[in-house]
Image: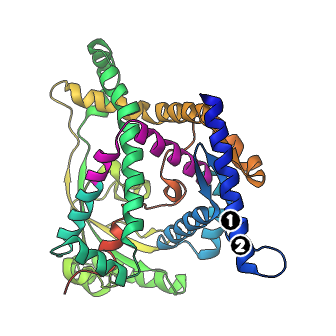
Amino acid sequence: MKSKLFMFARTAFVAAALLLVSTSAALAQEGEPVVIDSVVAQVNGDVVMLSTVKREVKDAVDAFKQQGVPEPKAIEEVTKRQPELIASLINELLLVQKGKELNMTEEVETEVNREMLRVMTSQGFKAVNEMEEAMRREGIDPATIRTTLRTQYMKNAVLSREVDAKIYFGASQDELKKYYDAHRDKFRKPEVVTLSEIFLSLAGKPEAEVRVRALQLLTQLRGGADFGTIAAANSERQDPSGNRIATQNKGVVGTFPLPDLKTEFVNAMKNVPVGGVTDLIRSDEGYQILRVDARTPASDPKTFEENQVREAITVERRDKERGEYLKNLRKEAYIKLAPEYQATVGPLLTTSTLPTGTTSSTIAPATTNPTNKAEASGSKKP
């Protein structure tokens, strides 16, 4: 059976390559054929194409740029980590194939439709086709969005059923109690803080000037100036449409468990009382001043809660077990890399610690659900 699979896979690989060359030759008409696309990897009966890799590279670069990373540095970082991206695409194909084998296609399609309906409702459309037409006008292809969602949901569904659920339900009562006793700190309710911010962007400005302005605002705040008034007049954080947010919310950011915040924020707020402001916080994007609006202290759990402990064990073991699961999928699959990728991508396919994230999100910051592109595009009905 396995030899037949290999024969089919090799046939598909050659057929894809021949199709690309013949198409390119026809387009070139004269001289050497111009390859417009090529096969990067064969994964059983599917292929990872160079055009897909290029698209993921572009998405990753864009994600870095949205975080304030200069384009040359973003390109350098993504290029350096391109082998990880290709390996993740291979993982992704294997998980999709496994999901189809487990008859999860209908379940995943239901989730995709549910997500599209959620976006439709949140954007004020009366029908999905009306929303999709608006997406096309904004340069967003609804079919591409649906394909991306299918892949994400299929991947997550397979890993959840085949790995996470087995960890979650696999622990005995005795193991749960021992884990709880040994890790009581994990089950404390964390400190929660409510924050407001003033943000000054570095984009297109000399840093020295931005810092001086930020220090002036900090001096005013510590002199008794109203934070909301200063934020509304000066904070430069924008919504997806390019409008300054602070004019509406006076800088209020929200309420967060302390462990969910970046380390630099936690450190900056360490000795700041309620109503106080932090020193300047420097990031790649600009300078921030945070005000601590409220604090709820951490507290110990009152009783042992089985589900909480099962969740904690699952989170702790999940990455390692998912890595092992993917390693086994790759071991059982037919995977053929194009020669130019064997030295860089090949070693990644033998490890059990390969990132399991989706393609460009594996190497880029601030990933979001793909339908957020539709929500952020300004395509909402007037």
Q: For the point 25% across and 46% down, which residue is it?
A: 191
In three-dimensional space, the C-alpha distance between marks 1 and 2, rounded to whole angstroms, equals 6 Å
Q: For the point 70% across and 58% down, which residue is it?
A: 17
Crowd rating for badge 2 (residues with CA inside 10 Å; few <14, some 14–19, many 20+): some
Q: For the point 24% across and 80% down, which residue is it?
A: 380
Residue 161 on image: x %, y %: 35, 34
| Pointer 1 with pointer 2, Cβ within 8 A | yes
Residue 367 on image: x %, y %: 43, 60
Amino acid type, mark 2? Ser
Magenta span dominant secondary structure: helix
Q: In the shown orientation, is residue 17 left or right of residue 150?
A: right
Q: In the shown orientation, is residue 83 left or right of residue 358?
A: right
198 or 104: nearer the viewer: 104
Q: Quarter of the image containing the N terminus? A: top right
Q: In the shown orientation, is residue 293 left or right of residue 137?
A: left
Q: Give the labeled residue for mark 1.
A: 20
Quadrant in the rendering for residue 15: bottom right
Residue 77 part of the magenta segment: no
Residue 288 on image: x %, y %: 39, 72
Tag count in the figure? 2
Residue 92 part of the magenta segment: yes
- Residue placed farthest to the right in the image? 31
332 or 258: nearer the viewer: 332
- Does residue 11 appear in this view? yes
For the record, the magenta segment spans: 85-111
Crowd rating for badge 1 (residues with CA inside 10 Å; few <14, some 14–19, many 20+): some
Quadrant in the rendering for residue 150: bottom left
Numbered disc 1: secondary structure: helix
Amino acid type, mark 1? Leu
Numbered disc 2: secondary structure: helix
Q: For the point 41% across and 60% down, which residue is it?
A: 147
Q: Give the labeled residue for mark 2.
A: 24
